[in-house]
Amino acid sequence: MTIAAPPPDAAAAQRLAAVRARIDAAAREAGRDPAAVTLVAISKQQPDERIAAVLAAGQRVFGENRVQEAEAHWAARRDTIPALRLHMVGPLQTNKAREAVALFDAIHSVDRPRLAEALAKEMARSGRRPACFIEINTGEEPQKAGVLPADADAFIERCRGEFGLMLAGLMCLPPRDAVPAPHFALLATIARRHGLAGLSMGMSADYAAAVTLGATHVRVGTAIFGDRAPR
């Protein structure tokens, strides 16, 4: 007898519960309060029925990589779901600073002076102040965005002093084939030097390890939603 698989929307809700349980277990194992870890469900390139299922299961914090796609997913929902919080987790073009400040509650990819300046000016103009995370290229990969670790101290101070950004923390994306723990530890070390509490680190493959090393925000996509639709 063949048992039919659950529809994608039900499966997404089940996967969400499993991710939450694993975060809870990893936090408790590390002696941390699970409530100190924010699960950011990465909804980029996901069909609307899966997003709706994850919303129905109680998830309220979501992440997107592109401003235009985020507007398509969330613009109509913002007014009807007051607790909804949106995080920008992908590379951000300077000319999208106005839209990003208007739409997102947190921006995890501040990685260069021109972007920091553009965000600061838009926050001053609009009065909205999304939480800002500086992206650190811990693997020093030339193809990736992010501030090099050797330049991180100066850039953090410049963001605070020259641009007046209120920084929430740091973000990293370890190299694909690398052991992630040393990268998470490096990010935490830089954050401590500057009194920054937020650590945005850990994705579908390594979020439990990130929690044990102090992550305050984990960015989980396919482990919740399943494989992304092709562009």
Image (cartoon, rainbow, N blue to C red):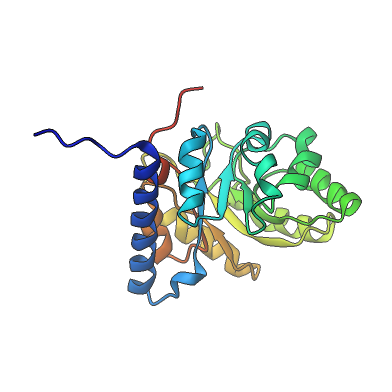
Residue 49 to residue 41: above or below: above
Residue drawn at the location 52% of the way across and 37% of the way down: 141
Q: Looking at the picture, how far across and down is residue 70, in whole percent? A: 64, 38
Where is residue 161, by image quadrant? Answer: bottom right
Looking at the rendered image, the quarter that the N terminus falls into is top left
- Horizontal placement of 30 versus 45: left or right? left
Out of 231 and 211, give the one closest to the viewer. Answer: 231
Kindly identify the residue that appears in the image at 53 percent across and 36 percent down.
44
x and y percentages locating residue 117 in the rendered image: 82, 46
Res 220 visible? no
Above or below residue 211? Residue 61 is: above
- The answer to whether residue 103 is left or right of residue 31 is right
Residue 160 in view in this figure:
yes
Q: Residue furthest front?
A: 1
Residue under the point 63% across and 67% down: 196
Residue placed furthest toward the top: 231
